[in-house]
Image (cartoon, rainbow, N blue to C red):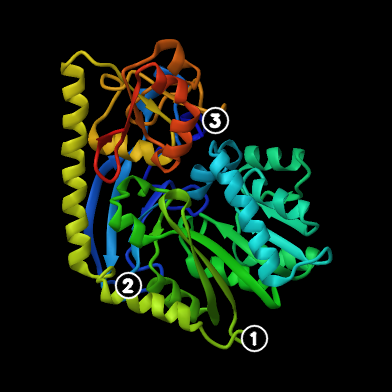
Amino acid sequence: MTTKNMSYHSTDIKEEATWVHRKRGKCRSCGGDQLSLFLSLGETPLANSFLETPDEFEKELSFPLEVYFCQNCSLVQLLDVINPEILFRDYIYVTGTSDTIADHNLEYAQTVVDQLYLNSGDLVIEVASNDGSLLKCFKRLGVKTLGIEPALNIAEIAKSSGIETITEFFNFETAQKVKESYGFAKAVIGNNVLAHVDDTGDFLRGCRELLDEQGLIIIEVPYLGELIKKLEYDTIYHEHLCYFSVNALIRLCETLELSIIRIDRVSVHGGSLRIYAGKNSYYKSHTEEVIDFAEEEKQDELISWQTMLDFSKEVKKNRVDLMGLLKGLKEEGKTAVGYGAPAKGNTLLNYCGIDNNILPYTVDKNPLKVGLFTPGTHIPVLPVPTLLEKQPDFVLILAWNFADEIMRQQAEYRNRGGKFIVPIPKPKVV
């Protein structure tokens, strides 16, 4: 998305159809007001609001990026909510550009088919289906598919590759309409979307509405445990409203009469949970494995206020260390550029104050981002071959969750003497 699409400039507009930014007063899971701020990343532009020209720099909008802990139900969340019409209708993140995600999708589809014994008569629905990369894997396995994707430009990519896609935001009302037209689904999948929705209860209620009695809601979410343990603070941005622990997920599912029967730990996006939940009229209770997982979180004090405070201190230290490394290299006359233009990178760049004076450019494989400027820091995004053309001394890997893949693909750059910097959890040269 570019700023030319951001036609809403007043943060005081209250009408539901036109508001840009509003602030919640209650926890979006339990509805309580015991919310405590523990981390502020400052006023930050939207992480996927790339700019087309320097003329747009002065008009750029920024919003508070502050993280709260619910002392009642332990959900970690943002209270500042950006209108999803602005965030998602015109989107530039596509899942089909990464080899790592492609391999992940193949394994994912096969796992779901095996878990539910899916056949050609069964329907799999994916909410926030993006370019249809995952649904293509199901289709190859002989299963019927349907995507629901609000980003009009991304949905067109899916449709052009043969994936039937509905271009709507998903909620309970949408689910009722889909059920009337397509019937019940054996699996309703949502990857990296539950954290994006303001009304998590309504979202899951919609998923439940689409399930047949023995079906499963299968959700992938970045795991709070990995966020805290690996200091993945750059995965915090306005699109990600919630940061889930197993305890928070259990509580949320119980309010909707859902039982979690399986949890997989998966490595994508810095470490995620894949949960399998079904109607408690069929799946009578959470499995012992799930209960044990939640108990381990309590014993490890993952969902404690002190853990949140300690995390905040480490985030501040990371900023000091990373800026010290980059400024030291510049003082030595070394050149450093970026690799990747992910949303997480824009949180890191803005919070740390890394602009185009420190990184003159970054490179990215996504053609939708090449030629644009990063939000807030205004770093030009260039094509990946630029690395070998200019051979900088160091490359800061902003898409650190794909660091191994990137370094493997850029072996020639390294063979010529180039070095990589991984910023998370501690800045290091590799």
Which image quadrant is residue 392 in? top left
Q: What's under tag 1, amino acid-wise? A: Tyr
Q: Quadrant of the C terminus?
A: top left
**Tag 1 and tag 3, C-beta contact below 8 Å:** no
Image coordinates for residue 176, horizontal then vertical, percent: 69, 68
Q: Residues within 10 Å of mark 1 (few under 14, many from 20)?
A: few
Q: Is residue 304 above or below residue 134?
A: below
Whether residue 380 is visible to the viewer of this picture, yes or no, is: no
Residue sitting at x 38%, y 74%: 247
Residue sitting at x 69%, y 60%: 125
Image coordinates for residue 395, horizontal then vertical, percent: 35, 25
Give the residue at mark 3. 366
Which image quadrant is residue 246 in? bottom left
Q: In terms of secondary structure, where does tag 2 sit?
A: helix
Q: Residues within 10 Å of mark 3 (few under 14, many from 20)?
A: many
**Tag 2 and tag 1, C-beta contact below 8 Å:** no
Q: In terms of secondary structure, where does tag 3 sit?
A: loop
Q: Earlier in the sequence, mark 2 or mark 1?
A: 1
Mark 2 vs mark 1, CA separation in Å? 27 Å
Image coordinates for residue 380, horizontal then vertical, percent: 41, 20
Q: Is residue 398 left or right of residue 323?
A: right
Give the residue at mark 1. 282
Q: Earlier in the sequence, mark 1 or mark 3?
A: 1
Q: Is residue 241 left or right of residue 165?
A: left
Disc 3 vs disc 2: which is toward the camera? Answer: 2
Disc 2 vs disc 1: which is toward the camera? Answer: 2
Whether residue 379 is visible to the viewer of this picture, yes or no, is: yes
Give the residue at mark 2. 297
